Image (tube, rainbow, N blue to C red):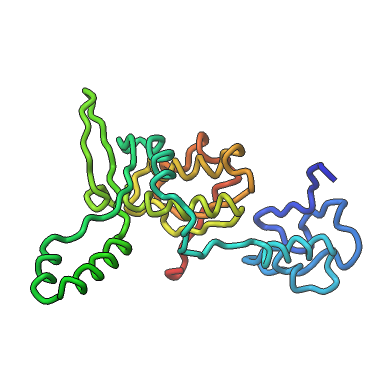
Amino acid sequence: KGRSLSLYSRRVNDTYKTIKLGRALQGGRRRIPFFANQSYLAAAWKTADSPKMLRTISAYLCGGIKLHNSSHYDSVDQGSVASALLPYADVGISKVIARKRGLDADRIATMQKYLSKEELEKTLRSMTKEREQEYLFEHRGNHGEMGIIKLDEESEGTQRLFASFPRLLDVLDKGLTWLEDEIDTHMHPYLVELLMRLFNDPEVNVNNAQLFFSTHNMGLLSERLLRKDQIWFAEKRDGA
């Protein structure tokens, strides 16, 4: 009804007998037994006579989150997206240039030895049509000089960020959830911060997309990037 509501409050040592329940949890069996390492919602999800509100929330968390798992983005202009976003990542790239990859002159010379003129022309038309797109990155120096670097010559972090832009757009556009294990692997902290800022910016993330990631980088746990309630710590026990 447009206002925050406290359903329950659970302290570290609370049991189902001592957990504090809010006024909204009315009807059904309120104090649902749960294990020490189990969430209260997980216990309510499996109990038929638990309050309807708890079961509704549990059902959403179990089945309502739409994960992103697609790897095909035919409609995304990757070069334009990268040109718009990379300057904000502080990687020294001012522009991304997209062009068709050139034909291999040595390969053409070899085909000329074995193919007729008609066959060669047909093959070249096919090769021209199927040429892959390649991307070049424009870097400007401190004194205005310009240099062009191919994608495979860029750092692993820049390559990974560039490859993730179509997925990023798809997630933000459809309001999906992006799961990423150890997000800062082969990625410069500036690049990770860019992703975090985009997801946290309400003017960009208008469809409430979510980014869940694990990291060992304590530098990302900054109040300028995350609220305290967005950070969760995990402890390994018995290798898990």
Q: From what the image shows, is residue 219 above or below residue 129?
A: above
Q: Residue at x 75, y 60 (%)?
A: 57
Question: Depth check: 106 or 9 in front?
Answer: 106
Q: Residue at x 50, y 64 (%)?
A: 70
Q: Residue at x 73, y 69 (%)?
A: 43
Q: Residue at x 39, y 38 (%)?
A: 89
Q: From what the image shows, is residue 207 above or below residue 105?
A: above
Q: From what the image shows, is residue 95 above or below residue 25?
A: above
Q: Quadrant of residue 200?
A: top right
Question: Depth check: 197 or 96 in front?
Answer: 96
Q: Quadrant of residue 103?
A: bottom left
From the top left corner, tell me how far across and down residue 81 is, in percent: 44, 44
Question: Depth check: 93 or 12 in front?
Answer: 93
Left or right: 76 with respect to 4? left
From the top left corner, tell me how far across and down residue 234 is, in percent: 50, 57
Left or right: 209 with respect to 146? right
